[in-house]
Image (tube, helix red, strand yellow):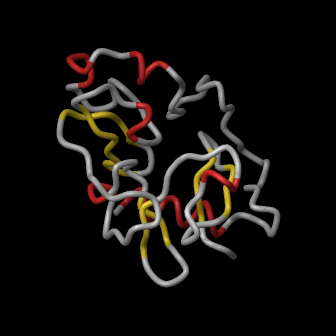
Amino acid sequence: MTRAIFLLALLAACGSDGKPPQDGAVPRDGSSDGGAGGDAADANSSQCTTPNACPCFSNDDCPAGTRCHAADPDHVYCEPGARGTGAPGTPCTGEMDCDSALCVDGTDQMRCSKTCTTMTDCPSELPRCVDLFEASICARQP
């Protein structure tokens, strides 16, 4: 739920073009503190047993046998455990409901999201591909 609130705050900061403000932007190469980077997906799941050992943005960044967990907005990491099963667009109440670990505000209720590169990657319930700091995710219409 913490990450959902954090993602909602980021989405609320987006202008009509779906882009977040550029001030304080985090480089997408993972070079800053707290960035997901690309190393988590390559990490062995046994290395992801300590909080913050394997930072992530979604389950896509975590090795098999682990899931992306938001302890708070500054501590999002892979931890051992089963992933949610909700497909993008399905209702959710928190990160543990979604196969991506991304539960965001939909037009009518919270919905599972996913990372995306274009709007065609997104379900009709979350039709926009919004660029956040670490990745782009499917989001509701403004």
Above or below, 58 against 138 in this view is: above
Across and down, in percent, residue 69 comes to: 31, 45
Describe residue 37's horizontal placement relative to residue 49 as left or right: right
Q: Quadrant of the N terminus?
A: bottom left
The quarter of the picture where residue 129 lies is: bottom right
Going 59% across and 39% down the picture, which residue do you hit?
134
Q: Is residue 21 left or right of residue 28?
A: right
Residue 63 at x, y = what percent?
Answer: 32, 25
Apparent side of residue 106 relative to residue 46 in the rendered image (left or right):
right
Q: Is residue 32 above or below residue 15?
A: above
Q: Position of residue 95 (x, y in %)?
A: 33, 56
Q: Quadrant of the C terminus?
A: bottom right
Q: Which residue is depicted at the point 34% across and 30% down?
A: 52
- Which residue occupies the foreground of this view, 20 or 108? 108
Residue at the image position 78 percent from the left and 66 percent from the top: 15
Q: Residue at x 26, y 52 (%)?
A: 84
- Name the image quarter holding residue 9: bottom right
